[in-house]
Amino acid sequence: MRRVAVLGATGSIGASALDVIARHPDRLRAEVLVAGSNVDALLGLCRVHRPAHAAIADESGYVRLREGLAAAGLSTQAHAGMAAIDALAADACNDTVVAAIVGAAGLTSLLSVERTGKRLRLANKKSLVLAGELLTSTARTAAATIIPIDSEHNAIFQCLPAEAMLAAGDGLDGLPGLRRIQLTASGGPFRGRRRDELSAVTPAQAVAHPKWSMGPKISVDSATLMNKGLEVIEAHHLFGLPGSRIDVLVHPQSLVHSLVEFVDGSTLAQLGLPDMRTALAVGFAWPQRIESGVAGLDLLAQGSLNFEPPDLETFPCLRLAYAALETGGTAPAVLNAANEVAVSAFLQGRIGFLSIPALVEEALERIPSRNADSLDALLDADARARAATTESISRKVCA
């Protein structure tokens, strides 16, 4: 029986993880459920899955959580605060952790898990962008096993040969026969547009993804191709390949999730319907396969599959991500923080769509990269980038 801690249980990834877990009561159990501030949603999940522990990051929700568990007649123990969540993540009550807490908030729990050498199923891509060097070195020291749950990186994982199994981020740069990996991108809502056609884009247009219903931040990142740039950085840390061996292909059907090319001319691709439960089932059962609840792919019904190169002139955020990766150190943390501030300002109607990459580029130019060898250094770079970008936005708004 694999005992699973789901960090970020009330989000979409948490819901998918719990769906897969519930399909396999003989081999998977939700032992720990963690949420940010939604006590009611967490209580609902506890009533269904009956975990041993439940934790809410917002400490003001502790009493409601504890009393709600008692009122439901559950023996689930209530916890609150990030320190308690970090301790639960590292506790021996679970052996597998699904890490889906968004952004920097999930960093300390990730490090706690890695230091124990547990199985980490990683869905928090921003943590690798912010602190990839630190996370992979920590995992390597503790011999922790990382399997990515992000669909593109999970696809690469599935296409790799058995001897290239992801163990503690050892990296594939020296793997004989591997030429490159290719991440696919849907292209977002503005695929095929020219740069001059994007100056008047509204937030409502930017969040209207042609394939999926996502949160506003990730939808805008998809529209700017920054989301794919962040995935390039994530792939670098997960697979140990330089940016020159990580390509991006625009694939509007979103059925081919990634490809791996070998020196003999072979290219392996992972295909499937766009559903996170497939990647989660791989993460839970690997190297075996289990039912995920996702239907098979009917290629005859899907029709043609198309591919095209990304337009880096119209969507410079992808180019900036490659540049930050090349610079290394704290540059990816600066990229991520500046982008978050810029996207927030765009969604509030304070800046235009094309100002997002301009602000990110300005932050990368203003804030020099430093060694990314400690959490303090990374969080400092994050804070400086946010402050600098906020200042730049204020100047633009007031001008």
Image (cartoon, grey):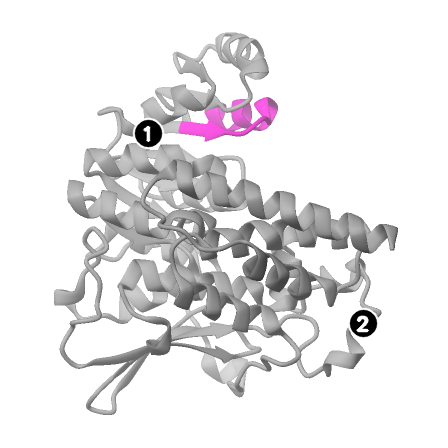
Q: In which quarter of the image is the C terminus?
A: bottom right
Image quarter (top left, top right, bottom left or bottom right) of the N terminus:
top left
- Going by the numbered disc 1, the residue's amino acid type is Ala
Residue in the image at 42% along x and 49% along y: 123
- Image quadrant in which you'd find residue 157: bottom left
> Which class describes the residues within 10 Å of circle 1: few (<14), some (14-19), or many (20+)?
many
Residue 35 magenta: yes
Q: In the picture provided, is 143 more to the left or to the right than 309? A: left
Q: In this view, does 100 lie above or below 312?
A: above
Give left or right: position of 23 versus 1: right
Q: Name the residue under label 1.
A: 89
Label 1: state its secondary structure. helix
Q: Range of the magenta residues?
A: 33-47
Image coordinates for residue 171, horizontal then vertical, percent: 22, 62
Closest to the observer: 300 or 45? 45
Residue receiving disc 2:
199
Q: Which of marks 1 and 2 is in front?
A: 2
Question: Callout 2: helix, strand or loop?
Answer: loop
- Residue at image x 63%, y 61%? 362
Rounded to the nearest angstrom, the CA distance separating label 1 from label 2 is 45 Å
Residue 342 appears at what percent x and percent y? 68, 53
Q: Is residue 200 left or right of residue 72?
A: right
